[in-house]
Amino acid sequence: MFANYLKIALRNLRKHKAYSLVNLLGLTIGIACCILILLYIVDELSFDRFHTKSDRIYRIVETHTEPNQGERRFGVTVAPLAPAMQNELPGVENYARFVGLGRLTIQYGDTKFYEEFFVADPTVFDIFDFDFVQGDPATALSNPFTVVMTETTARKYFGDETAVGKTLKTDRGFDFEVAGVLKDLPHNSHLHFDILFSLATVTANERWRALLESWDAEGFQTYVLLAEQAKAEEVESRTAVLVAKHQPVDYNVNKQISLQPLADIHFGSGNIEADRNANKGDIGYVHVFGAIAFFIILIACINYMNLATARSASRATEIGLRKVVGAHRWQLARQFLSESMLLSLLALLLAYALVQNTLPYFNSFTGKSLVLYFSNNGLLLVGLVLLALFVGMLSGSYPAFYLSNLKTMTILRGHLRAGPGQALLRQGLVITQFVLSIVMIIATLAALSQMNYIRDKQLGFNKDHLVVVDINSGAARQSFMAIKNEFEQSPEVESVSVTSRVPGEWKDIIELKVLPEGTEVNAARTTNFFGVDENFLVTFEVELTAGRNFRTSMSTDTTAVLINEAAVRAFGWNKPLGKTFRTLDRDYECHVIGVVKDFHFRSLHEKIGPLVLGHSHNPMQSIDYFSARITGGNIPSTLDYLKSVHEKYDAVTPFEYHFLDQQLEDFYQADQRMIRLFGIATMLAVFIACLGLFGLAAFTAEQRTKEIGVRKVLGASVAQIVIIMSKEFTKLVAIAVIVAAPLAYWAVNKWLEGFAYSISIDPGTFILAGLLAMAIAWLTVSFQAIRAAIANPVNSLRYE
């Protein structure tokens, strides 16, 4: 029986080539898109799950609640918390701590690189499953001055030589021995490092020993491994008691400890500060792309349903004869379902080939390393076959049960006509296709408008032609004035500023807890802090709205600060000039000499917060960057000059620089990547919908051949016939625009809530999307309409 079904299905596919091609193309593109999106979603959901103990690993997160400032969550805590938890709380089996100590220059022979100085407890390899290719994980980080590195990093320094036992020199005056080499960390790990130093290295330092025992100095990224029977909620509540017992009371901050499951870190780090998670995910995008995959598959299935039901009259005789010779309804239904599933399986084979060829481009768009292999993943193959069968069932279900239910006598008497219910269903399906497509068009246009708004928005400073050069060594810091003066000697350099941070900072911005003049201790405010020199305002073109700038000739300016307008509002001052505040964490008093206009020193996802600009001679100040405004006339030679000056004073660390405008783009890299993918998905959805419209228009033209012939004989022009044939589809698309508009408005508003500064949704976006959808539909239908309109009416009326 199955062989017979298969034979008839193949015969029908060959007989109706155009119909089969339209359906096959739509299903192929739909399944290929679905596979790519599912690969992306599975990868996103797999983060950190490769660790065998992942269900028992938790990160410690601190939540700080401050008066008038709400909640802030931090991915770091104090060093002694984890050891105390293991020693004093039942259920805590082990712990591992990480802490970043800046960067240092590492050298082996003539090979020299600037690396992150990231240290960790030796227990890290007891908790996490990072595979060793050289060395012993049990002892790799047990001793001082030992280091573990990834395979790629080992090749960078040692080539094909064995790395374990080799000695690396540093610019800090001490050497390290390589104790282990790891396989490169999986891309779906939130933890990423190239080199990991032993925590025992820094404990030799007296200051660091005090820090490891301090319940007041936060900065350690901490993970705990719970026992198999332990409950995280109970450990969390006991930890709160433990913290209250050991940690000093801060009357300005209410601190709470929570345990974040390892599997939640990828998607749960969006609002966590001081977080080293380099691969922060957004579960919203996973939901969006899951919906897109479903939409695209649904649009492709609707094509099949529409065309199959539209062609029902052409198969009526076949159905009638089968029923006369004894075929039951379920046999007929199975026949039609076998056709849809055969077509779906053929589409799956073509989709697999399409995915294999497009996967490299998809990976470049998403920044992932996705692969589609069945050799070691039979479950994936089963899943894809089930997907194809599901698509076949979904697309073929209505046609199968509709066609198999036709009455035998009605068919054989030739009275079969498409009823109003069938016509309404087809119209409803077309509307559904275009509603989904138009929602995606509107969302894409709105997202592009938001990105253009971000790109063109005035940030309060001039980001163009600003070269930011890192200060990476003590030698450069000691000679910063000489370096700055030599930078300014170039005719291509307009001005240079020395700062601790820059707008659009990619490192953690320093924060101060300040007590404004005239307020009580419990009204302390947290503010951001930049250390700057007198050239900062000129170099970054920041506007001074009140007071004056720093002056190196005035010795009192070492305690002077500039504040932004947001700080004036936060401190509740009407006349800020001459006011003072005290920094509680550093016990230092500053006086305000000027106010600068608010400028965006973080991304547009965040509102402008209070900012204090301290003078470069201020004891709170450290210097980390030279920022040079250049003319842009000859950028390569300008960079060569800056590099030569840097190397003159710093022969150890490499010359590192960024163009600030490019660095600011990185804030929105994930958003831009998702918008590009969304745009491609939108185009494909529209294309698949148009395939169905094309097929329906062809069928309509075929059904109305005689009508068109009569109209032409009676004098109708080609334009009139095209309008008559396009009118029905135009009405359907217009209805789709009306239905899609509120859905798209809601979806776009939800996305824009993630930006502190965003566009207002322009009605023109909806009008443009509607016109685009209408134009695409007209172009699709017009091809068939014109073809029918210019046909010779004699051919259609010859036998009448």
Image (tube, helix red, strand yellow):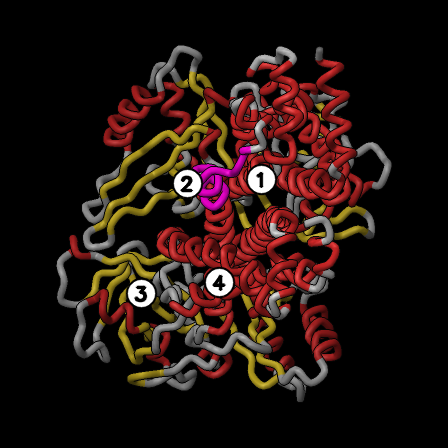
Gap in angstroms between the C-alphas marked 1 and 4? 28 Å
Answer few, some or many: residues within 10 Å of disc 4's Cα (few below 14, many 20 plus, some between 14 and 19): many
Gap in angstroms between the C-alphas marked 1 and 2? 63 Å
Q: Residue at x 28, y 60 (%)?
A: 583
Gap in angstroms between the C-alphas marked 4 and 2? 46 Å
Name the residue beneath numbered marker 4: 769
Q: Earlier in the sequence, mark 1 or mark 4?
A: 1
Gap in angstroms between the C-alphas marked 4 and 3? 40 Å
Left or right: 292, with 753 as reference point: right
Answer few, some or many: residues within 10 Å of disc 2's Cα (few below 14, many 20 plus, some between 14 and 19): many
Q: Is residue 601 above or below residue 87?
A: below
Q: Nearer the viewer, residue 44 or 24?
A: 24
Name the residue beneath numbered marker 2: 76
Quarter of the N terminus within the rendering: top right
- Give the residues drawn in magenta, as a range: 415-428
Asked if labels 2 and 1 touch by Cβ distance under 8 angstroms, the answer is no
Q: Earlier in the sequence, mark 1 or mark 3?
A: 1
Instruction: Pinpoint residue 96: horizontal percent, then vertical percent.
Output: 50, 28
Instruction: Pinpoint residue 555: horizontal percent, then vertical percent.
Output: 37, 80
Task: Give, as a three-letter code, the residue at label 4.
Answer: Ala
Q: Residue at x 19, y 52 (%)?
A: 67
Task: Give, as a three-letter code, the residue at label 1.
Answer: Ala
Q: Nearer the viewer, residue 436 or 169?
A: 436
Asked if labels 3 and 2 touch by Cβ distance under 8 angstroms, the answer is no
Q: Nearer the viewer, mark 1 or mark 3?
A: 1
Gap in angstroms between the C-alphas marked 1 and 3? 65 Å
